[in-house]
Amino acid sequence: MASLQEQFLKAGLVDKNKVKLVNQDKSKQKKVERRTGTVSVDEARIAAQELQRKNAERARELNAQRDAAASQKAIAAQIAQMVKQNRQSKGNGDIAYNFTHGSKIERIYVSAAVQAHLMAGRLVIVCLGGVTELVPKVIADKIAERDASLVVRVKKVSNEVDEDDPYAAFQIPDDLMW
């Protein structure tokens, strides 16, 4: 294959005098480098390497973002599948059960048996896509490992009384609904 100079000559882009001048400049530069012992810096090559390095770095960042998005999507699909397969019936909704999700107080209607399971901690509320579902505690723990913001934990009420509590003498009835 012909050199680039020969190809340019054949195409008529450069003439023989221009090629001769370029070759003379190259030989002069090499002579000066040999005499002084310095190496000339090819700025175009360095710029091309820098551009290639930046493009590779950007490609790595984009791949990392794409992988993270795919991972989040897979986790969301796993959570949706776990909720769908393990959701429990709320029973005949005659008792209002209030709970806090985030900063809001929400309400679902459940049966007395389901309310007892919720208060005992055997069932846990999961808010997924604006829908509240009841799942067993084991499944809720697995969901919480993936995304804890979806699981609503019921705080156990302790029967211990503080010494400084001014209302220690007044007991709260068990059947009090708020």
Image (cartoon, helix red, strand yellow):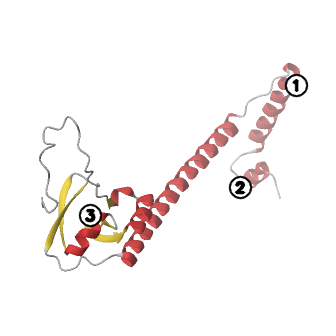
Q: Position of residue 77 (x, y in %)?
A: 43, 70
The amino acid sitting under disc 3 is Met
Give the number of the disc on residue 119.
3
Residue at the image point whose x is 22% and y is 79% from the top: 91
Q: Is residue 132 visible?
A: no
The amino acid sitting under disc 2 is Ala
Q: 15 or 121: nearer the eye?
A: 121
Residue at the image point whose x is 82% and y is 28% from the top: 28
Q: Earlier in the sequence, mark 1 or mark 3?
A: 1
Q: How many numbered circles does the render carry?
A: 3
Q: Label 2's element?
A: helix
Tell me the residue that label 1 is attached to: 34
The alpha-carbon separation of the residues under discs 1 and 3 comes to: 88 Å
Tell me the residue that label 2 is attached to: 11
Q: Position of residue 88 (x, y in %)?
A: 31, 76
Residue at the image point whose x is 18% and y is 80% from the top: 92
| Quadrant of res 27 | top right
The amino acid sitting under disc 1 is Arg
